Image: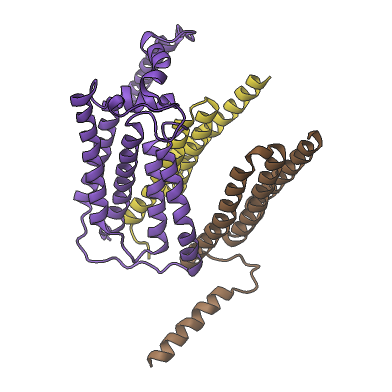
Chain colours: A brown, B purple, C yellow
Amino acid sequence: METLQTIGAFVVLAGSIFIFLGALGLVRMPDVYNRIQAGTKASTLGTLLTLVGLIMIMPAWWNKFLLLAIFVIITNPVSSHVLARASHAAKIRLSKKTVTDHYETYKKEKEEKAHGVKS
Amino acid sequence: MIKKLLLFVLLAGAGVMFWTGISDYEVKQDLNPIASYYADQGLEETGAANLVTAVVVRYRGLDTLGEVVILFLTASILGFFLIKRDGKNDFRESSEILKTASRLLEPIIILAGVYVFVNGHLTPGGGFQGGAILASALILAYLANPNDSISKTLLKITESFSGLSFVIIGVLGIILAGGFLDSTLLPAGSIGNLISAGVIPIIYLFVGLKVGSELAGIVTNLKYAPKNESE
Amino acid sequence: MESNLNIIIAIVLGVIILIFAALAIYHKKLSVAIIAAGAVSLLASIMYLLLAAPDVAMTEAAIGSGLSVIIFFYALNKIRKHHD
């Protein structure tokens, strides 16, 4: 049992390292969309790793941690998607290094299609 | 200059007041009489495993009623001032991902809220917390489908019915048992079961429904409030 | 040992709460101030949990950092003047 708990502690440590990298990304990234990307991906993985480690440390509570993990898996990507969409709708500028913006072209194509149908 | 001096005098006065309050503060080792009475007798008298719930519902039930009334007043004042005048607001349609995820999440959140206030006499939690979680599920529904509206009359009926039931149970306690909101109206049952602790679970059910519908009503009123168009 | 650790965590939390509270008061952007106020509530709920009051912690987390932030944002959206 002792070894399982040690492994669990290391997994929790790995998870917290991922969360720290996500926080670093929030500071380092150039614009909103990249920040959302860094924050969401790293923090989702970090939280999941932490929960897995906690299951190893405390196997009796696995069902609660599993429920938490499912909740995080559903909510975290959806909330980041909504944030990114809202900031795109609020016309927050992209960084200067951006190469392509597929959502903008998609919106334009949709608009043109709608106009084409009307006229 | 004189304003700053006045401010300084005011701050110094407040500092002296606080200092006299905390300078001779000692951590008390033993509870005061009423708290020790609650701690000793509460478990047997109410049958609730969670002592905080026993105090909130049984011994301080009147205060809980007051809190609920304050919340009701807030909700009704908001409804009075933010009444919908200008037809239906148009909101930007939300994305497919959010709609699907909210359809998946709403039952889970509502279940969590109901769990919190139904188990209020056993585990930490209770009517207010569960009601807030319920209201957050309704807010998620608003955010996901901004152009659909949840029936306001349903919210109103839920709120009025649960408030009325709360008071009726309290008055029944005066008539049939020891006093207002006496939980010995129903048999206490064995500690730790879901159906135990007399009327405490029922009261918490109504408090939870009332708080949830009130908070959801506040957000509904805010959503359809007319925008400030002063510029 | 354990109580010492608890006290250290509580002190760190208290300092962070003070920083966020100052941010909520002094920041010029109202939306940042609202988010800072929500963060104060979230950290305060952890503080209540450390002080062995899980009921209060649940209330603070649900109402303080969840609902009141949403209600503040709704109100801000209603009263904000249009810049465009």
- Relative to residue B73, is residue B221 depicted above or below? below
Residue situated furthest bottom in the rendering: A119
Residue under the image location 32 percent in, 36 percent down: B202
Residue B36: % across, % down: 41, 11
- Relative to residue B30, is residue B120 depicted above or below? below
- Residue A24 visible in the displayed image: no
Is C47 in front, or is C14? C47
Residue situated furthest top in the rendering: B24
- Relative to residue B163, is residue B8 depicted above or below? above
- Quarter of the image with the N terminus of chain B in it: top left
Residue A47: % across, % down: 64, 47
Is A29 in front, or is A111? A111
- Quarter of the image with the C terminus of chain B in it: bottom left
Residue under the image location 64 percent in, 69 percent down: A98
Is C56 in front, or is B5? C56
Q: How many marks?
A: 0
- Relative to residue B203, is residue B228 depicted above or below? below
Residue B97: % across, % down: 51, 66
Residue under the image location 44 percent in, 49 percent down: B111
Is B120 in front, or is A73? B120
Residue B109: % across, % down: 46, 50
Residue situated furthest right in the rendering: A3
Residue under the image location 41 percent in, 90 percent down: A117
Judged left or right of residue A38, residue A7 is right
- Residue C48 visible in the displayed image: yes
